[in-house]
Amino acid sequence: MEKKAELYAGKAKSVYATDEDDKLILRFRNDTSAFDGEKMEQLERKGMVNNKFNAFIMRKLEEAGVETHQIELLSDEESLVKKLDMIPIECVVRNIATGSIVRRLGVEDGMDLDPPTFEFFLKNDELHDPMVNDYHIRTFGWASEEEVAAMKELTFKVNGILKQLFLDAGMLLVDYKLEFGRYQGRIVLGDEFTPDGCRLWDKDTRNKLDKDRFRQGLGGVVEAYEEVAHRLGVPLE
Ligand code: 5GP
C-alpha cells in the first residue's frame, strides 16, 4: 500500500490518498483541540494511543455487526480505512447528562438519562456545530430519510455494545459522537471512536478519563487515555 498526497488535515487527524481509489490512510496526530480549535496543544503519545484505541473499538464494533471503515493498523499512528463519502453530521447519544446538554437545557449535571437521548449536530466549526434535526438534514440535502434512520439506529446499536464493554472495565460511557459516510450504497461508521470524542467516567469515583481533562485543564490527559486503554486490554506497545 503506497501512501500518496495528503488530501485533508483535520484538527487531530490527517487523511492521505493511497494507490487504491477506495482506500485512505488516516494519521492520528498528537494535536489536541477544543472549543472549535480555539484551544490547541500537542500531547506526546496521543496519536499512537488514539490510533490503537480506535482500531480496537472498531474491531469490537465489527464483531458485533456494525460495519466500520477500519481495515487495519499500518503503524503506531496510521490506519488503513475504506474511503467513505462522509455525511457532515455528528450523531450524539447521551447516557448521562453533562456538557452542552446541561448548558442548553439547564438539567442536572450527572443525572442518568433514561432513555438515552439522541442529538444531531452539523459539522461546521464556523457555526460552532449547531444542533440540527432530521428535517434540516433532509431539507438541506445532507442525507436522505433512509440515511438519517440508519445513522440513528447504528448510533444506538453502538451504545448497546460499548456501554457494556466499558462497564465491564469499570467505566461509564457518558456520551459520544459518531460520524458516518456512504460506501457502496451502505451507511458505514467513519471518523474515530476515541476518548477525544466521547466521555468516560470511572464507575465508582466518576473521575473523568476523556478529553474533558483537556477542555477543563485538569492535566493527565494522555495518562487517562492510557488508563482507559489498559483497562480494556488495548495493546499499546
Ligand atoms: P457536547 O455536546 O456535550 O459538547 O458533546 C457530546 C459528546 O460528543 C462528547 O463526548 C464530545 O466529546 C463529543 N463531541 C461533540 N462534538 C464534538 C466535536 O466536534 N469533536 C469531538 N472530538 N467530539 C465531539
Image: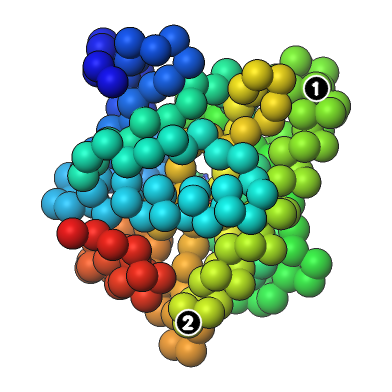
Front residue of this view, candidates 150 and 22: 22
Q: Quadrant of residue 112?
A: bottom right
Numbered disc 1: secondary structure: loop
Name the element at disc 2.
loop
> Relative to residue 47, is residue 117 drawn left or right?
right
Callout 1: CB less than 8 Å from ligand 1: no
Q: Where residue 235 appears, x then y in whole percent? A: 28, 62
Dot 2 alpha-carbon crowd within 10 angstroms: few under 14, some 14 to 19, many 20 or more: some
Q: Quadrant of residue 202?
A: bottom left
Q: Is residue 13 above or below residue 164?
A: above
Q: Give the number of callouts.
A: 2
Q: Dividing the image into 4 quarters, which one contains the N terminus?
A: top left
For the point 53% across and 27% down, which residue is it?
Answer: 124
Q: Amino acid at mark 1?
A: Ser
Residue at 74% x, 58% y: name it. 117
Give the answer, above or below, for where 223 lies relative to 134.
Answer: below
| Residue carrying label 1 | 144
233 or 135: nearer the viewer? 233
Q: Residue at x 46, y 43 (%)?
A: 192
The reply to whether residue 137 is visible in this rendering is: no
Q: Amino acid at mark 2?
A: Gly
Q: Which label belongs to residue 5?
A: none
The reply to whether residue 57 is visible in this rendering is: yes
**Residue that mark 2 sits on:** 170
